[in-house]
Image (spheres, grey):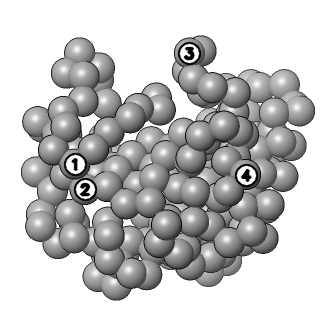
Amino acid sequence: MHVTVEVGSRLDPDIDYPAGAALTMSAVEPVQLMIFLSHPHQLEVDAVTAAPTQFAWIDGDEAAVLLYRLGPILSWSQVPYSPHLAEPDDPPPGVDPRGIVQIVLVDRDTNTVRALHRVRWPADFTATVRASVTKMLEKPFHRSGYEHVLAALHRRYPTAEDLLTDRSDARCTATPV
């Protein structure tokens, strides 16, 4: 679901966008973190571009989780990931070699892009995520394995903060592009 957007643009109304967040990673385009909220508060809109922009990566073999914290006010959030779930028309899964991440906040009720920010992951964080994605691509995909890993992570670490503290494989603070 990698899309080209700008603040104020409207996404295709015929697509059913997920509640929460969606993560798209491609070897040839920036990582795209799309956050879908109903009527986002101005604090949530402002947080997209406020420093610090922090990330953590959890490698669960058949599934991964990207934790993110935008700005100093919002708490940690999470989005699951598997390269095997990429749309057929998306570019090949992977991680942008420059470590660029595009964060897009969309008002889910109007499909309007409310905020957009580009940041760069440090090289070591990018390398960790790339190795994890490559490892997942080398294994056959089983949806039941993917769902089992995510359920087990959520049972053992019920909050994003628990995952961050007790299970993260890598953490970083991104820099603006």
* Image x and y of residue 43, in percent: 17, 72
Residue count near mark 4 (Cα–Cα under 10 Å), binned few <14, some 14–19, many ≥20 = some
Rendered position, 13 above or below 69: above
Between marks 3 and 4 in the image, the one whose residue lies nearer the viewer: 4
Residue 115 sits in quarter: bottom left
Nearest to N terminus: mark 3 or mark 4 = 3
Nearest to N terminus: mark 2 or mark 4 = 4
Q: Are marks 2 and 4 in contact (CB under 8 Å)?
A: no
Q: Which residue is mark 1?
A: 7
Q: Residue at x 56, y 48 (%)?
A: 31
Rendered position, 15 above or below 59: above
Mark 1 falls on what kind of element?
A: loop
Residue count near mark 1 (Cα–Cα under 10 Å), binned few <14, some 14–19, many ≥20 = some
Amino acid beneath label 4: Pro
Q: Residue at x 79, y 61 (%)?
A: 128
Of 177 and 3, which appears nearest the observer?
Answer: 177
Q: Which residue is mark 2?
A: 115
